[in-house]
Image (cartoon, rainbow, N blue to C red):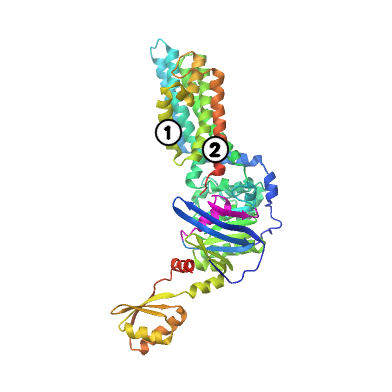
Amino acid sequence: MTVPSAATAASDPQRADRHRSPGSFLAIYRLVLRNQVTAGRIIAVSALGGLAVLLGLGVRASDSIDIISDAATLIDQYGLQVVAPVVSLVFASSGLGDMVDDKTLVYLWLRPTPRIQVAMAAALAALTVCLPAVVVPLVLAAAITGAGPALTGGTAVAAAVGVAGYVGMFCAVGIRFRRALVWGLAYILLWEGFVANASKTAGRLSLRGYTRSVLSEYTGVGFKQASLSLPVAIVVPILVGGAMIAYAGFRLSRTDVD
Amino acid sequence: MTTVGTVPHRRAMIEVSGVSKWFGDVVAVSEVSFTVPSGVTALLGPNGAGKSTMLRLLCGLVAPDRGTLRVLGRDPRADIGVLRSIGLVPQQETVFDSQTAFEFVKLAGILHGIGQPDDAARDALALVEMDASDTRRLSTYSRGMRQRVKVAQAIVHEPRVIFLDEPLTGLDPRQRRHMTELFHALGDRGRCVVVSSHVLEEVERFGSNVLVIAQGRLAAEGDFRAIRDLMDDRPHKIRIRTDQPNRVAGNLLAAGTIMGIELVDADTVLVETTNVQAFRRTVTAIARDGGARLWEVVPLDDDLDSVFRYLVGR
């Protein structure tokens, strides 16, 4: 058996410090994408999206005199409160969270790859799945209601902005907590479902307040806790998502790895 | 801590100084200090002794609560650059199940930034006698095959320091021999290879330099043969069941093969000896000469835990 000597070995710490390979980012992105897309998750996400389309058909078939209000409420109550956060939670928290749980994170962690690069690759993998899985069925549902292009456009922007924020947040939750799915659901149900509706300040600390504001700005339909301007409602969730990805990278460098 | 035997002096590639690590109330590693040069070094200790925690500390996977660790002069927890020079075979069996062996090892190569990850992955898999063209997913692999793939991913980037946590688990005897030869080949080529095990016979094959960890403490350090002698020379307790325990024990004492006697009941006596070989040679003859019938001779503390407890208590 022939093994190279240590003197000729490729491992040179100084060289490693200089090494920042784009190949590493792509390799992690592909790995996370492959790991997180399972048959069970695809079925669950398709069912959520399919239900949105069916509800859109239901609104269209109704004899509503204010179709835009009913359709916007459907998108807000089901699309932005359920589909966007739940789909983002399922994929974003599992990207690195599954590796923490099954103890395979060591195979990424023990490499000279900047931790922020790992977190960004995982977030991008989650976005790759979540954006089409959320935006397409919700836009389809909005279009089917027949409420007009304002709702369709507002739905597309609100859903995309929401996904960007939720993915970053749940990426961090996946690294920070074991059983991230439970913590994420607790946030969606308790904080966004109840607490954020209770006061204006709490609403500002909830991503749903921003996505709801986007929808409100586009459609002119007034929602509770939806008083933010369009630029703020678009920019803040994206910034929050980015900040949470940075936090995930920071946590990754501090976390104990099994 | 006991330092025994002579290990040839070489420059330390790993330096551990006063390191402690606890998880809640449990002290996993306590005030451990040692250095490791190039070549193969065995980390020996019973299950739960702190070996895996020690290896995790050395890789930077966890931070020490007290003390300092340096691998190639750098802190593996704070300085990710040094990870380029470290390879680890973790104890857990899990790997990326959706990948093939080749993809798994190549991924390690890519993340380490090596120039030709495809070629390096093929070479590493060949070293552990695995087929790089195998298209089966790792989820279909046996425990032993996974173990070999884990070794391949740890050496694909030709690290200068390699940690292997119970790497022979699940391997058949031929593969065990092959792996042991591979570790020695790596050590002979100037790498620092640290192999953990709880099996004494395994450690004997790994090499002469041994660190014994028990109850989170470094119990002994040095040449394997000297540590083995230390283990063999410790007092052993043996239970003898015979129809004449007084006579057998008395004759053994008179022959100088035992140091202590404790009569347990009418047909059982516990004896203590530091020379098990001499005891084994003489006990049957002494019983026969005394007209006694031996029913049972059972060593009570031959398990590794007893050996390690003894070393810690020294």
Three-letter code, disc 1: Leu
Of residues B153 and B280, the one nearer the viewer is: B280
Amino acid type assigned to the residue bearing label 2 in the image:
Ala
Q: Dot 2: within a 10 Å radius of its alpha carbon, few (fewer than 14), some, or many (20 or more) residues? A: many
Q: Secondary structure at mark 2?
A: helix
Q: Residue furthest right?
A: A8
Residue A200 figure quarter: top left
Task: Name which residue lies at 45% across and 54% down.
Answer: B26
Magenta segment includes A164: no
The location of residue B260, given as percent across then percent down, is 39, 79
Q: Decide which of B9, A154 is in the foreground and name it.
A: B9
Q: CA distance from mark 1 to mark 2?
A: 19 Å
Q: Nearer the viewer, residue A218 or A186?
A: A186
Q: Which one is closest to the eye, mark 1 or mark 2?
A: 2
Residue B63 covered by magenta stretch = yes
Which residues make up the magenta segment?
B47-73
Label ID, residue B160:
none
Q: Which mark is residue A248?
A: 2
Vertical order, B311 against A192 (above or below) = below
Relative to B308, say whether A19 is above or below: above
Q: How crowded is the residue under tag 1: few (<14 C-alpha within 10 Å), some, or many (20+)?
A: some
Percent across and percent down for residue B310 are: 46, 69
Nearest the camera: A203 or A80?
Answer: A203
Residue B306 on image: x %, y %:
44, 68
Q: Tell me which chain the residue with mark 2 is part of.
A: A
Q: Which residue is mark 1?
A: A185
For residue B85, side relative to residue B293 (left or right): right
Q: Is residue B221 above or below residue A85?
A: below
The percent position of residue B38, horizontal first and vertical second, equals: 64, 62
